[in-house]
Amino acid sequence: MALWGGRFSEAPADAVFALSRSVHYDWRLAPYDIRSSLAHLSILESSGLVAKEDAKSIRAALVKLSSEVLSGKFVADPEDEDVHSALERGLTQKLGAIGGALRAGRSRNDQVTTDLRLFAIDHMLEIAALITQLNSAILNKANEYVNDSAPGFTHIQHAQPVSFGHEVAKHAQAFSRDLERINDWFKRASVSSLGAGALAGSSLPLQPEVTAKNLGFESVFANSIDAVSDRDYVAEALFIFALIGTHLSRIGEEWTLWASTEFAWAKVADQYSTGSSIMPQKKNPDMAELARGKSGRLLGNLVSVMTMLKGLPFAYNRDLQEDKEPFFDSIDTLLLVLPAVTGMVATTNFDREKMALAAPTGFSLATEIADYLVLKNIPFATAHEAAGKCVALCESTSRQLHQLTDAEFEQVHPALDGGVREVLTVKGALSSRKTSGGTAPKIVAEQIKKTMELNSQHAKKIADRAKAFSEMMSA
Ligand code: ARG
């Protein structure tokens, strides 16, 4: 059913209808559309624009329609243009002409963005909860390996040894920032647009603040022209999703590398691996690869919406309908990827011995020699030069740093006495890096504990919000 037609003498051409139609994807806004209709009905009733008895039957029909949508009894038909027109058809089929009463003071322009905001909040909460679960998996895994050493890398070359718990836990910092970002996003997303009408507000005695409260929004629009045109909350959410995707892709890359035969650090659980149709021996980390690969579409969806919004005139233009598919796609993608990555992280085991053996190789303790000299008041540039000489001496004689003789050390620099041997162990190197945020196991354990606490605070906040949201939806 179309919601317009009075001034037209001909029906739209098939191609026009086909291009305009959005109900095949915006149908998922139906529960939010019904809920915002209930809020709109309340204000129409309290302002005396809809009679009490009529309001009662419209409310009952909306509630019935809601359960029919949920059970699949009521579905969009091929004639319906979008979710709003399909639901109005449902209502008028039940009530006759009074089904059209809800259109007073409301346009699809303020309606669609109100629905989309509710949808966005609901799904953002779901994604945020999944991120806290991923963070728990990361932090628990990190905790298992706090006292295990591994080479740390720059340029994928051995740089300095680190606690492997430190290496794993770093990912939780990125996701904690994502949770902070989501928390901040709510301020701008939780704004009601209902009452903005087509663009100019309403001549009817509606009370947008009351409707906003009814729908659980934190605030209400300040400018009706902006209210119907603003999709910043979609663009911002898509940026957050793209960044989450980027963070997931970096886990994916690391896991893929660590599971390779050359590294052989990571043993990805069978449950989270896949095989090959031709090579019977293969066990591939496809979940890690998909986490890496899906980041492409998450970024693409952001670019798609930003491009659509760029230079778009105010107020409503049909271009805005193009906000939905990329938005839905990013949400669906994360709802698929996050649990898979969480499971993969939780079930991967690492070869402690192999990592520990690799930790001191590649002269990764050379910085310790330089720092040892600095502690003896030698300027760092001189210390760096001396440590470099030790490495060159080792390379030309195929030895490791700790295999140089006392005489050789002293020859390189007189301050390099026997004490240097103490720092030439991975254990010594790790525990000496005890400034805050450093890799000393004691410090790493503290970092993990703090991040776990922060993560539980986020989880609690999200659960509280989700509870309030679902209460609002069923009110
Ligand atoms: N399906 C439309 C959308 O998603 C709803 C708003 C249509 N408004 C209009 N004036 N044509 O944007």
Image: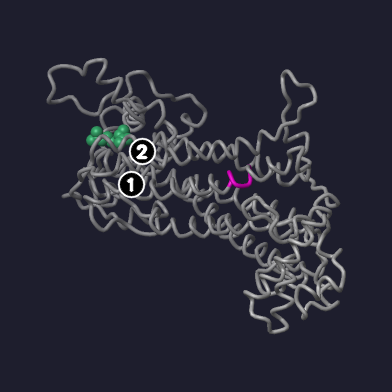
**Mark 2: which secondary structure?**
helix
* Ligand 1 found in image quarter: top left
Instruction: Establish whether ligand 1 lies closer than 8 Å to the Cβ of label 1.
Output: no
Instruction: State the residue in front, 324 or 168.
Output: 168
| Residue where numbered disc 2 is placed | 323
Residue 426 left/right relative to 82 = right
Tell me whether circle 1 and circle 2 mark residues in contact (CB < 8 Å): yes
Q: Residues within 10 Å of mark 1 (few under 14, many from 20)?
A: many
Residue 202 can be seen in this image: yes
Point out residue 93 in the picture as x, y percentages from the top left corner. Answer: 34, 24
Point out residue 321 in the picture as x, y percentages from the top left corner. Answer: 32, 35
Q: In the image, what residue type sits under mark 2?
A: Asp
Point out residue 110 in the picture as x, y percentages from the top left corner. Answer: 28, 44
Q: Is residue 169 magenta?
A: no
Q: Quadrant of residue 2?
A: top left
Point out residue 349 in the picture as x, y percentages from the top left corner. Answer: 79, 46
| Residue where numbered disc 1 is placed | 231
**Mark 1: which secondary structure?**
loop
- Which region is colored magenta? 248-252
Q: Residues within 10 Å of mark 2 (few under 14, many from 20)?
A: many
Q: Main secondary structure of the magenta part?
A: helix
What residue is drawn where x is 38% and y is 41%?
303
What residue is drawn where x is 63% and y is 42%?
252
Q: Quadrant of residue 447?
A: bottom right
Instruction: State the residue in front, 25 or 402.
Output: 402
